[in-house]
Amino acid sequence: MSAPHAPTGQPLPEQANAERRYEVSRSELPLSCPMPAMGVWDSHPRVYLPIESEGGKADCPYCGAHFVLVD
């Protein structure tokens, strides 16, 4: 499994919600915010986002992070 990436192509920061837009691949589904690679101790509760049924885009209702399915 590849690591999720911020729009810059860099691996996600360990801090949750550090970016406003994230690119994810199908191998990272099911999608949750914060994502498993992110630290959650200082973030909101984990919520699962239905990115596939939302046309490949989803927004977190807690932090507003925007996720885009790239493959």
Image (spheres, rainbow, N blue to C red):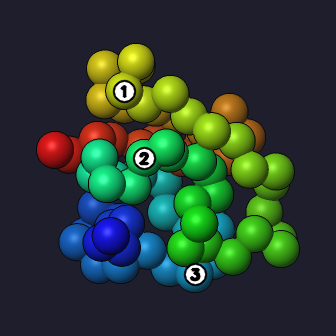
Query: Mark 3 packing: few (<14 Cα in 10 Å), some, or many (20+)?
Result: few
Disc nearest the viewer among 3 and 1 = 1
Note whether 69 is above or below 27 in the view shown: above
Dot 3 or dot 1, earlier in sequence: 3
Q: Which residue is drawn at the image coordinates 57% and 81% (left, top)?
A: 14
Label 2 neighbour load within 10 Å: few <14, some 14-19, many 20+:
some
Q: Quadrant of the N terminus?
A: bottom left
Extreme left residue here?
71
Q: Can you say which quadrant of the picture contains the C terminus?
A: top left
| CA–CA distance in space, label 2 to label 3 | 18 Å
Q: CA distance from mark 3 to mark 1?
A: 25 Å
Kindly state the secondary structure of the residue where label 1 is placed. Answer: loop
Name the mark on residue 10. none
Identify which amino acid the numbered label 1 is placed on: Glu
Residue tagged 2: 29
- The foreground one among 34 and 28 is 28
For badge 3, the amino acid type reads Glu
Query: Where's residue 29, x and y in %?
Result: 42, 47
Q: Which residue is mark 1?
A: 52
How many residues crowd mark 1 within 10 Å: few (<14), some (14–19), many (20+)?
A: some
Mark 2 touches mark 3? (CB < 8 Å): no
* Disc 2 and disc 1 in contact, CB within 8 angstroms: yes
Q: Is residue 41 left or right of residue 29?
A: right
Amino acid under disc 2: Leu
Mark positioned earlier in the residue sequence (2 or 1): 2
User: In this rendering, does residue 22 appear at all?
Assistant: no
The answer to whether residue 7 is seen in the rendering is yes
**The quarter of the displayed image where residue 69 is located:** top left
Dot 3 and dot 1 residues touching (CB under 8 Å) = no
